[in-house]
């Protein structure tokens, strides 16, 4: 397996100029992994205005590869049971970039952001039907803590947590 030098990557907070690229990456990634399985999820059809609103709350980040957006992640600070936690969502990578380990790089950065705002726990959820994502999160040390039904979309999701 070849490795890609870290100098080719940069991670930063997204800005409004990134909205179009982020929207395109989200739409493609969530259409490929969710919608094609019959799972309706907002990120598959998220528009640029919705993306700008998320960017405005300073919770959206991008990973650049050779100056181009290769992936994105949203990390939100939440209070859960009197504890500061990070909720990770909208994790997506540019199509054709699997060999660059974009998802793993994004999750490593997301965990660092969580620690920076005092979180000791990172939480996320994913559809029960997407075995590849479940295996990905488990390989990163996340443990499934339960499941729930998305009321607006009627599919089962699994909660995952990891202490950071």
Image (tube, rainbow, N blue to C red):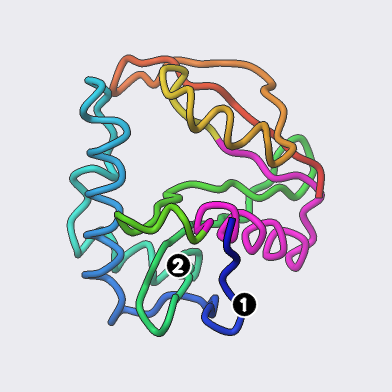
- For mark 1, give the secondary structure: helix
Decide: marks 2, 1 in contact (CB < 8 A)? no
Image location (x, y in percent) of residue 11: 54, 76
Q: 28 or 39: which is nearer to us?
A: 28
Q: 66 or 157: which is nearer to us?
A: 66
Q: Which quarter of the figure has residue 40?
A: top left
Q: Which residue is mark 2?
A: 57
Dot in front, 2 or 1: 1
From the image, give the main secondary structure of the stretch colored magenta. Answer: helix
Is 163 above or below relative to 158? below
- Taking the spot 43% from the left edge, 24% from the top edge, the residue there is 130
Q: Is residue 67 left or right of residue 120?
A: left
- For mark 2, give the secondary structure: loop
Is 39 above or below relative to 22? above
Q: 114 or 138: which is nearer to us?
A: 138
Location of the N terminus (image quadrant)? bottom right
Image location (x, y in percent) of residue 149: 43, 15
Number of numbered labels in the structure image:
2
Identify the magenta region: 101-124
Look at the image and say whether residue 157 sits in the magenta stretch: no
Q: Which quarter of the figure has residue 56?
A: bottom left
User: Disc 2 and disc 1: Cα gap in Å?
Assistant: 28 Å
Q: Is residue 62 left or right of residue 138?
A: left
Image location (x, y in percent) of residue 78: 63, 49
- Taking the spot 26% from the left edge, 22% from the top edge, the residue there is 37
Q: Mark 2, residues whose alpha carbon is within 10 Å: few (<14), some, or many (≥20)?
A: few
- Taking the spot 72% from the left edge, 64% from the top edge, the residue there is 112
Which mark, by number, is residue 155? Answer: none
- Taking the spot 35% from the left edge, 18% from the top edge, the residue there is 151
Q: Who comes first in sequence, dot 2 or dot 1?
A: 1
Image location (x, y in percent) of residue 95: 30, 54
Q: Which residue is mark 1?
A: 6
């Amino acid at each position: 397996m070849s490795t890609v030098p870290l100098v080719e990557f940069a991670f930063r907070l997204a800005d409004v100029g990134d909205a179009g690229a982020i929207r395109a990456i989200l739409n493609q990634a969530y259409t490929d992994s969710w919608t094609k399985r019959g799972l309706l999820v907002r990120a598959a059809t998220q528009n640029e205005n919705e993306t700008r609103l998320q960017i405005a709350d300073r919770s959206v980040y991008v990973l650049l590869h050779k100056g181009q957006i290769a992936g994105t992640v949203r990390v939100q600070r939440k209070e859960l049971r009197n504890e500061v936690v990070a909720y990770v969502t909208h994790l997506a990578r540019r199509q054709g970039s699997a060999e660059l380990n974009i998802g793993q790089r994004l999750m490593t950065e997301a965990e660092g952001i969580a620690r920076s705002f005092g979180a000791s726990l990172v939480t996320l959820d994913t559809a029960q039907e997407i075995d590849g994502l479940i295996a990905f999160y488990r390989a990163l040390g996340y443990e499934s803590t339960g499941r729930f039904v998305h009321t607006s979309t009627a599919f089962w999701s699994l909660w995952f947590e990891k202490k950071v």
